[in-house]
Amino acid sequence: MAAQTQKAIFVREVGEPLVSGERPIPKPPKGYILVKVLSAMLLPHDTYGRDWGLLIEERLPYVPSANIGGVVEKLGDGVTSFSIGDEIFGQGDPMYPTPDSAGLQEYAILDADAVARVPEGVAMDDAVTFPVNATTSFEALFHPENGFGFPAPLPKDQKSSSHEANIDLQAQTIVIIGGGSSVGRLGIQFARLASIGRIITVASIRNEAELRTLGATHVVDRHDTQDSIAKKIHGIVPCDYITHVYDCVSWDPSLSLLIVSRTKESTILTLHPFDLGITQEQGLEKCQVRHLFGQNQFLRPMLKPFWENLPQWIEEGTLVTRRHRVIEGLDLVKIESALDDYRDGSAVLQAVVHPWGKPWLF
């Protein structure tokens, strides 16, 4: 690695187009690894960062993409779980003070606790579709403070004592709004992995067969009116027993508030910020609304066991990926177009970028 600088794609001004440029190749600090980035996936929060400054406005210029795959180039002090040359995938950190832990560049640093080897027989481009979305849905379902706190499907020696060992998961119900989204699909799959009895999702009815294959027990058409959606869900499970609602897509909390219990302690988890006081305004004093960020630091203390088990879940097909398209090289026009696709909330064929172009394995 003779060069001291690298090619990168930047958000220089919020609301303005991305720009190409160069920046220094980072050195991995203690507990981190330096990765030659061979694959990086674009996600909706990359669009929100470019257009609204989400997470990055105070640290411009910044580099998008937190789903990263590549080859280990250097080890920071204290890293013993990986070797130079390992093919890995992991989650970058959009909250890192500099763009060193981002994907749309040739090299990046990753927290060694938030990295795994690419599983045997799995393409790196497929593995790189998981990090942010899988972290988010795992946190939603299993984190004892940030999420619902269902017992996590981990080996016994990795389970937290805070989990309720005697909970009857078959008797539990979860409603996932936006089950056809990437993060929603993983929510369904984690719910199935945890043996939750009723997994109700609001999604396009044309995806019903696929979502049932992933683990959904009921699919309610998202194109119905909100009143009709709520009525259908309450026909499956009475309103008083809907206490766990995971909304993966909405910017408006009205559907979640129609669905959730009026009488029991309940939780709405959302990926988009709602007014956290809105439940009191709606007379839902027993309902909590929490906004999930789906980043490494918010998954602790479950971060390391999650990353230790994620490759196995992928390899054995317990978690499956969506189709995606590939952008060869740091092609500014194609990357901009891929980010634009997230603007209207319609179904998107997500894009994986190969920063080194094709062929990218060498």
Image (tube, grey):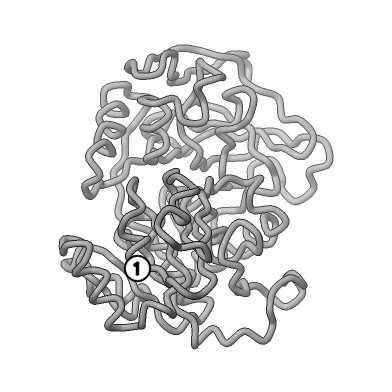
In the image: residue 58, left or right of residue 331 = right
**Where does the image place residue 271, in percent across and percent down from the top left?**
44, 49
Tag 1: residue type?
Ile
User: Residue at position x 58%, y 40% from top?
Assistant: 71
Residue 187: image quadrant is: bottom left
Q: Is residue 348 above or below residue 105?
A: below
Q: Residue furthest right?
A: 78
Pick the residue in front: 85 or 254.
254
The reply, left or right, for residue 95 in relation to residue 22 is right
316 or 265, which is in the foreground? 265
Q: Nearer the viewer, residue 189 or 204?
A: 204
Task: Answer with the quarter of the image where residue 238 lies.
Answer: bottom left
Residue that numbered label 1 is attached to: 259
Q: Is residue 53 above or below residue 2?
A: below
Q: Which of the 4 image quarters holds residue 157?
A: bottom right
Crowding at label 1, few (<14), some or many (≥20) Cα neighbours within 10 Å?
many
Residue at image location 29% in from the left, 26% down from the top: 336
**Element at badge 1?**
helix
Residue drawn at (40%, 57%), measured in percent from left and top? 282
Residue 321: give x, y in percent of width and height: 38, 59
Identify the residue shown where x is 37% and y is 77%. Answer: 239
175 lies left or right of 101: left
Q: Quadrant of the N terminus?
A: top right
Q: Position of residue 255 (x, y in %)?
A: 31, 59
Q: Position of residue 155 (x, y in %)?
A: 69, 75
Total number of numbered discs in the rendering? 1
